[in-house]
Image (cartoon, rainbow, N blue to C red):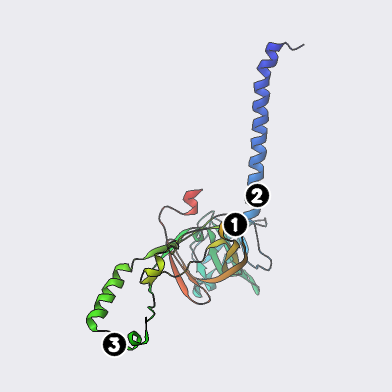
Amino acid sequence: MINKKSLLCLLPVAALMLACSKTAKQQEEETTTLINTMSYVAEGDSMIYGLACDGCNDTLLVLLPDSGGDPVNYSIIEARRQHKVFGRPSIGDKMAVLVNPENPGEVLMSINLEQVKGTWYYEQLPEARHRIPVNEKEATQEISKERRARFDSMIQTYMVPREYVYTLKRDFTVKTEGGPPRTSSLDASTPVVYPPMKRYTEWHIHNGHIIFTYGGIGIAGRDTIELKNDTAEFIRLRRDTMVLQFADHVQAFKLKPDTTETNAR
């Protein structure tokens, strides 16, 4: 029969074992969730995802597919000739490749997803705000050169660039920072205005394109905004530079130093 003294000694041990058991279970659930997120493939996506293996070079991509099996050797000669190799693969990098349907051993495009992740930004200058004439006389009056020079000088003092920042995370979410200043009663009185900024919340790769999602919950969580997508094509992807072709413009991004997803893990 266990006496009270022995029972008091065993209780802390049992509690510790139970706590460790719960922690392990929670860790397993978190790991499973992460694996499911990283293995997410959108419907209709023809890209093959996997890890770059030893043996990659300027003409060959060795890929261990997420679907399992042995590493596969792909020729990237044609993709490189067509400027469709985005990011130089290193061992262990997460890759997305588009295989030639007529030649399974050839890649038409490769994207190094490890280099896509990170904090990207571009600097945006404001635009001069159009001044509405007070009356018809002012509208037809010729502005003197001196007055124009003073006006241009004033505008230049307001031409301060602002950073538009997007952090593309490993779980395919986006953190958006910077952009136009917060709305205030003084905004209408300033002679310049900053272009609006898309507040992206997610990113995904689909058939060689990068798709950004925005919308969802509105101001203070009261309104629901329809989810919308912006689709862009890769033009360039290097260690510190990413250039994307959107439907109506080309946007170049710079990578903020020491803020990549690799360093944030």
Q: Quadrant of the N terminus?
A: top right
- Whether label 1 touches label 2, CB < 8 Å: no
Give the residue at the far left of this rendering.
146
The percent position of residue 244, horizontal first and vertical second, equals 49, 70
Q: Is residue 184 left or right of residue 43?
A: left
Labels 1, 2: front one = 1
Labels 1, 3: front one = 3
User: For the point 54% across and 73% down, which residue is it?
Assistant: 78
Mark 1 element type = helix
Q: Is residue 227 left or right of residue 178?
A: right
C-alpha distance separating marks 1 and 2: 26 Å
Kindly identify the amino acid type of the residue bearing the numbered disc 3. Glu
Q: Which residue is mark 1?
A: 221
Kindly identify the amino acid type of the residue bearing the numbered disc 2. Thr
One can see residue 164 in this view: yes
What number of labels is visible? 3
Q: Which residue is mark 3?
A: 142
Mark 3 element type = loop
Labels 3, 2: front one = 3
C-alpha distance separating marks 3 and 2: 67 Å
The answer to which quarter of the image holds residue 109 is bottom right
Q: Which residue is mark 2?
A: 33
The percent position of residue 164, horizontal first and vertical second, equals 44, 63
The percent position of residue 128, horizontal first and vertical second, equals 37, 75
Mark 2 element type = helix
User: For the point 64% across and 32% down, which residue is it?
Assistant: 20
Q: Which numbered disc, 1 or 3, marks the residue that appears first in the sequence?
A: 3
Q: Which numbered disc, 3 or 2, marks the residue that appears first in the sequence?
A: 2
C-alpha distance separating marks 1 and 3: 50 Å
